[in-house]
Image (cartoon, grey):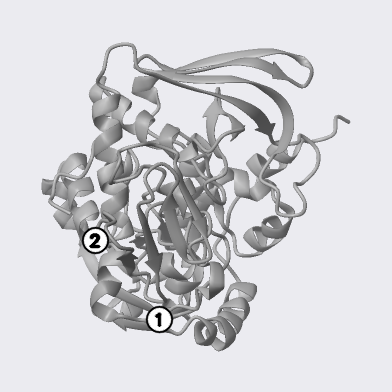
Amino acid sequence: MEKLTVADKIKARKIKRPGFMYGLLGWVWKTFVYKKYNVSCNINCDIKKEKRPYIFISNHASRLDYIFTGVPLLPQKLNYVAGYNEFHRSHLAGVFKLLKVIPKKNFTPDAYAIKEITRVIKSGGRIVIFPEGMSSISGANQPVALGTGKFIKHFKLPVYYSVIKGGYLTSPKYNLNDRCGKIEVEINKMFEPEDLDNLSPEQIEDEINQKIYHDDYEWNLEKQYKFNIGDNGIEHLEDLLFWCPKCNKKHTMSTSGNTITCSACGNSATMDETYKLTPIENSVIPRTQTAWFNMQRNVIREEVKKDGYSLSAFVKLGTLPKYEMLKNQRTSIITGEGLLTLDKTGLSFKGTNEGSPFEFFIDIKNLPTYGMCTDVSRFYTFVNGEFVEFYPEQNVVEEFFIATEELHRQNGGKWLDFKFEK
């Protein structure tokens, strides 16, 4: 009998509604984790009395959002949808199996995920999705993934939602060290089934984008909650904010302690426990890190319009092992290397994988963005349904993200930016 791969075993699962272990773990998280992260929740609707199957959606602020959203709804048990590749990681796979989490290949069609979501709903279950597809990179939302509106309209269920505030400041993408401070969760109702009859998928996505949008940095300018950022809380922020707003040069920012500085012009700022940036001397620093990120996007948006634009990087290539789980919190194993190039036509790779020549091309219309498993050191996509992760030698991950998203939008892609003023 042929040995089954990890992928075969995942695909063979028939997902059921969560059982006893969900409630037990929920109690543990409520007792210990909620206290640690100082979480409070306001439920402004009748979701606790809801007897019907429903869909619950939320902004995706951090890697802890399943706790921030699941605990307030206890004793109700919900099936979460999570990134397919996470089921290959040993420290998550067991918990995901116990909690009946549904795997979904992010930013690409996945018939298996839809089939299992349908199975759970038909059995009377409730589904939780984070429609952005991954946790926030910048501290604020990105638009929901393509197909979200069609998904909601297809199932025609009540839709509830939460907005998590403080999640990114607790667990930022650029630095994996948690910084406890304050979390606020607001839960409301978005749609009744009959509301969906008169809305197009695009209108549904617009409504979701507007309702769940949140900017942690702007929020905390008002709240002034303190987070235990420590003596190096700004470390690696240059991986995310690589452009200098004073001299307009890229990849000149560096961090030390809680100070960020441009090596080209000396533009610098310090960050305090509320994440406020204070300019040093005659420096030019945006109001918040999100404002800085958005200005950086505007710069890249104009760059990619120029004739002959391209972005290249030599990368190590990571893939998922066929028969073993990933250990030590790894997200892939290095099996190749080569040159990754992006231009207005799409993303191409030419190099090796598992000792043999390997290359691929993804049309820009089919590449809205990438996934990011952990921090801003690497990123991934799917090629012919298979997970591939890129580890660039240089600090260009976020530049690849922004340039790809803007090229996608400028060259006929369907994943568009927000229609409302942020």
Query: Which of the labelled discs sits on residue 211, or is there none?
Result: none
320 or 105: nearer the viewer = 320
Residue at image coords 32%, 44%: 148
- Can residue 152 be spotted in the picture? no
Residue at image coords 54%, 84%: 36
Q: Residues within 10 Å of mark 1 (few under 14, many from 20)?
A: some
- Give the amino acid at mark 1: Lys
What residue is pinned by disc 2?
287
324 or 73: nearer the viewer = 324
x and y percentages locating residue 351 in the rendered image: 66, 15
Q: Quadrant of residue 296?
A: top left
Q: Residues within 10 Å of mark 2 (few under 14, many from 20)?
A: some
51 or 303: nearer the viewer = 303
In the picture, the quarter occupied by the C terminus is: bottom left
- In the figure, 382 relative to 85: above or below? above
Residue 41 falls left or right of residue 119: left
- In the figure, 417 relative to 345: above or below? below
Residue at image coords 31%, 25%: 407
- Give the amino acid at mark 2: Arg
Q: Tell which tag, 2 or 1, sits nearer the viewer.
A: 2
x and y percentages locating residue 126 in the rendered image: 42, 63
Q: Quadrant of residue 188?
A: bottom left
x and y percentages locating residue 23 in the rendered image: 57, 78
Residue 175 falls left or right of residue 317: left
x and y percentages locating residue 93 in the rendered image: 69, 55
How far apart are the alpha carbons under marks 2 and 1? Answer: 18 Å
Q: Earlier in the sequence, mark 2 or mark 1?
A: 1
What residue is pinned by disc 1?
226
- Can residue 276 be spotted in the picture? yes
